[in-house]
Amino acid sequence: MSVSDDIERLLKLRTVAMVGCSDDPRRPSNQVARYLIEVGYRVIPVNPNHAEILGEKCYPDLASIREPIEVVDVFRRSESAGEAVDQAIAAKAVGVWLQDGVRDPEAEARARANGLTVVADDCIMRQHLSRMGR
């Protein structure tokens, strides 16, 4: 599969667990979550410091979510991405999206080896806007 195919595959999925989602509307993670909700995605915020973000229950980690997760969108530093990827593998997610500037080649390889689709160092909102519009 090409990177473009991977992007298309993940954009078609509708449930996104957002690791590192912020309650601050000035933060990119909050802006991306808000956009995804507005265009019809189910966004599950993951942040141990909040009980709720954007009207959705917030979970401390992926293991605490008791519903199927399709995409894990990671808004964390590259050095923390591996933990989120390992949790995505354990949660049986379909794919992992590492946001702009986030790369962890070893974690990306682990995800692919476990059958997950991976997009790294890219923005899910920007790709949605460019491919599917609002």
Image (cartoon, rainbow, N blue to C red):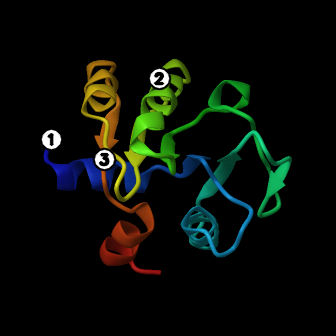
Q: Earlier in the sequence, mark 1 or mark 2?
A: 1
Secondary structure at numbered mark 1? loop
Residue drawn at (77%, 46%), measured in percent from left and top?
A: 58
Quarter of the image with the N terminus in it? top left
Q: Earlier in the sequence, mark 3 or mark 1?
A: 1
What residue is pinned by disc 1?
1
Disc marking residue 86: 2
Q: Quadrant of residue 66?
A: top right
Residue at mark 1 to residue at mark 2: CA–CA distance: 22 Å
Q: Is residue 98 above or below residue 69?
A: below
The three-letter code of the residue at mark 3 reads: Val
Label 2: few (<14), some (14–19) or many (≥20) C-alpha neighbours in 10 Å:
some
Secondary structure at numbered mark 3? strand
Label 1: few (<14), some (14–19) or many (≥20) C-alpha neighbours in 10 Å:
few
Label 3: few (<14), some (14–19) or many (≥20) C-alpha neighbours in 10 Å:
many
The percent coordinates of residue 101 (x first, y second) are 34, 55
Foreground residue among 103 and 110: 103
Residue drawn at (38%, 62%), measured in percent from left and top?
A: 123
Foreground residue among 36 and 27: 27
Q: Quadrant of residue 37?
A: bottom right
Q: Quadrant of residue 124?
A: bottom left
Residue at mark 2 to residue at mark 3: CA–CA distance: 15 Å
The three-letter code of the residue at mark 1 reads: Met
Residue drawn at (81%, 48%), measured in percent from left and top?
A: 50
What residue is pinned by disc 3?
119
The three-letter code of the residue at mark 2 reads: Asp
Residue drawn at (71%, 31%), measured in percent from left and top?
A: 65
Q: Is residue 31 left or right of residue 24?
A: left
Assess whether mark 1 and mark 3 are in contact (beta carbons under 8 angstroms).
no
